[in-house]
């Protein structure tokens, strides 16, 4: 078998997605998500200009060898653009191999370790009562785990806050800017989490995302302040480039910590995992080198009792979600999977077999990843430039996030 055709499909059914489609001379097809939110065309061009010429005629069965070729052969290693491009190829090759075997991918990854994939949904609102209402909506739909965010009094346009259970991380046009105040946030966040537990109880998992906005000592204070609310995790309390920052948080609080949605390789999280500075590793198929590399990260995590909690916001396409679920259902140290449902247009362009059932996602039993792309429909949604927002402090300084 040989790779006969490779193409990069850029479309925007509600938001931008970059998808790699490989076709073999036997007529099998494989898909890989290559979406890097706000930097989509860099990956599309990396693939088209530098990767696709290397794939023509290659044996699609050689998944690991192709990964090594693209990683070591480039000389320029790691980084989100490179690792997202490699991820797309890796995922498409696993899709092809599982289709050739006539099995859902998880069977090739060792089979099921569990009956379903526990997911958390998103609840947010401008005010605490709005957020409580959104949480109740999720619980009524069967969710067992909820991420709660809310607006902060005195600040407008806080990231990740809309009314309801889904939000779009990027906006069309140039980046939207908002004002950030750590003081206001640190006063408000414990109040939100306290209200959630006192009004709605402890019978569901509660998560909260800080979006990398604090310093280590500020994060330590927040972790301590919310210990009694029994969080499942506190996410991205500080930026993760400086892995030692997490040691300081650890010295001060028993609130579980999750990090990793912006990390791209095992080397980016090695210290966080091997020194047990975190409890959950959030790396994803699309941004951390594909199924092959993500399994190495999760394997390292398994050795240190760190569990998985892959990123799964709406900017990760249904192709990534499908791949994530096959990994989630098979690895021994699975923790939880983020799940924000896509828009109806997105779901129509990417028909898929995974489905929500009783607080869990099921990958489905279709051979391969269980997801396809309707290329004709995709063509009707051309790319639109969009960016993640930017936060500035009161004096205009760009704030970390
Ligand atoms: O900021 O997906 O946990 N989820 C998140 C998301 C991320 C976006 C980045 O593209 O933090 O909102
Ligand atoms: Co996050």
Image (tube, rainbow, N blue to C red):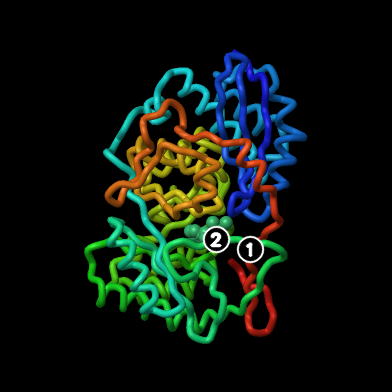
**Where residue 192 sits: x, y (%)?**
37, 77
Figure check: 310 above or below 176: above
Q: Residue furthest right?
A: 49
- In the figure, is residue 320 to the left or right of 207? right
| Dot 1 beta carbon under 8 Å from ligand 1 | no
Between 375 and 333, which is closer to the camera in this rendering?
375
Q: Nearer the viewer, residue 207 or 161?
A: 161
* Foreground pick, 88 / 296: 88
* Side (left or right) of 329 relative to 214: left
Question: Label 2's element?
Answer: loop
* Residue shown at the point (38%, 37%) measured from the top left: 363
Work out which quarter of the rendered image holds the N terminus and state it. Answer: top right
Q: What residue is pinned by disc 2?
A: 168
- Percent x, y for residue 262? 56, 53
Residue drawn at the location 61% of the way across and 79% of the way down: 179
Can you say whether 326 is above or below 164 in the image? above
- Considering every residue shown, the one lying at the far bottom of the view is 154
Residue 391, position in %: x, y?
A: 62, 73
Front in this rendered view, residue 59 or 384:
384
Residue at 64% of width from left, 20% of height from top? 3
Residue with the mark numbered 1? 171
Q: Are marks 1 and 2 in contact (CB under 8 Å)?
A: yes
Other-residue count near label 1 (Cα within 10 Å), few / some / many at <14 / 14–19 / ≥20: some
Q: Real-space Cα distance between discs 1 and 2?
A: 7 Å
x%, y% of residue 319?
Answer: 52, 40
User: What residue appears at the point 68 percent right and 84 percent down from the top-left corner?
Assistant: 395
How many numbered markers are drawn? 2
Q: Can the viewer see residue 372?
A: yes
**In which image quadrant can residue 209 be found?**
bottom left
């Amino acid at each position: 078998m040989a790779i006969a055709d490779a193409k990069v499909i850029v479309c925007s059914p509600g938001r931008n997605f970059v998808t790699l489609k490989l076709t073999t001379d036997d007529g099998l097809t494989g898909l890989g998500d290559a979406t890097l939110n706000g930097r989509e065309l860099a990956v599309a061009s990396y693939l088209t200009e530098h990767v696709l010429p290397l794939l023509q005629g290659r044996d699609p069965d050689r998944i690991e060898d192709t990964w090594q070729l693209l990683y070591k052969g480039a000389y320029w290693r790691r980084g989100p653009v490179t690792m997202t491009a490699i991820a797309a190829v890796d995922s498409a090759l696993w899709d092809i191999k599982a289709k050739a075997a006539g099995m859902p991918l998880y069977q090739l990854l060792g089979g099921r370790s569990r009956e379903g994939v526990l997911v958390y949904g998103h609840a947010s609102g401008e005010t605490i009562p709005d957020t409580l209402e959104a949480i109740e909506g999720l619980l009524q739909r069967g969710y067992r785990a909820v991420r709660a965010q809310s607006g902060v009094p005195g600040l407008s346009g806080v990231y990740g806050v809309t009314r309801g259970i889904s939000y779009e991380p990027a906006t069309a046009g140039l980046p939207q800017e908002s004002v950030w105040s750590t003081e206001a946030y640190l006063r408000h966040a414990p109040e939100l989490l306290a209200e959630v537990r006192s009004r709605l109880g402890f019978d569901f998992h509660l998560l909260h995302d800080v979006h990398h906005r604090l310093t280590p000592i500020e994060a330590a204070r927040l972790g301590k302040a919310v210990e009694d609310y029994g969080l499942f995790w506190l996410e991205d309390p500080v930026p993760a480039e400086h892995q030692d920052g997490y040691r300081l948080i650890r010295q001060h609080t028993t609130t579980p910590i999750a990090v990793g949605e912006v990390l791209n390789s095992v080397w980016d999280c090695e210290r966080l995992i091997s020194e047990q500075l975190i409890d959950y590793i959030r790396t994803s198929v699309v941004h951390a080198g594909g199924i092959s590399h993500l399994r190495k990260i999760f394997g390292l995590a398994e050795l240190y009792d760190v569990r998985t909690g892959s990123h799964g916001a709406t900017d990760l396409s249904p192709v990534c979600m499908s791949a994530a679920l096959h990994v989630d259902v098979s690895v021994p140290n699975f923790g939880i999977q983020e799940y924000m449902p896509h828009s109806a247009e997105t779901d129509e362009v990417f028909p898929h077999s995974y489905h929500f059932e009783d607080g869990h996602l099921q990958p489905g039993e279709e051979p391969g990843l269980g997801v396809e792309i309707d290329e004709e429909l995709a063509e009707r949604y051309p790319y639109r430039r969009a960016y993640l927002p930017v936060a500035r402090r009161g004096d205009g300084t760009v704030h970390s996030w």
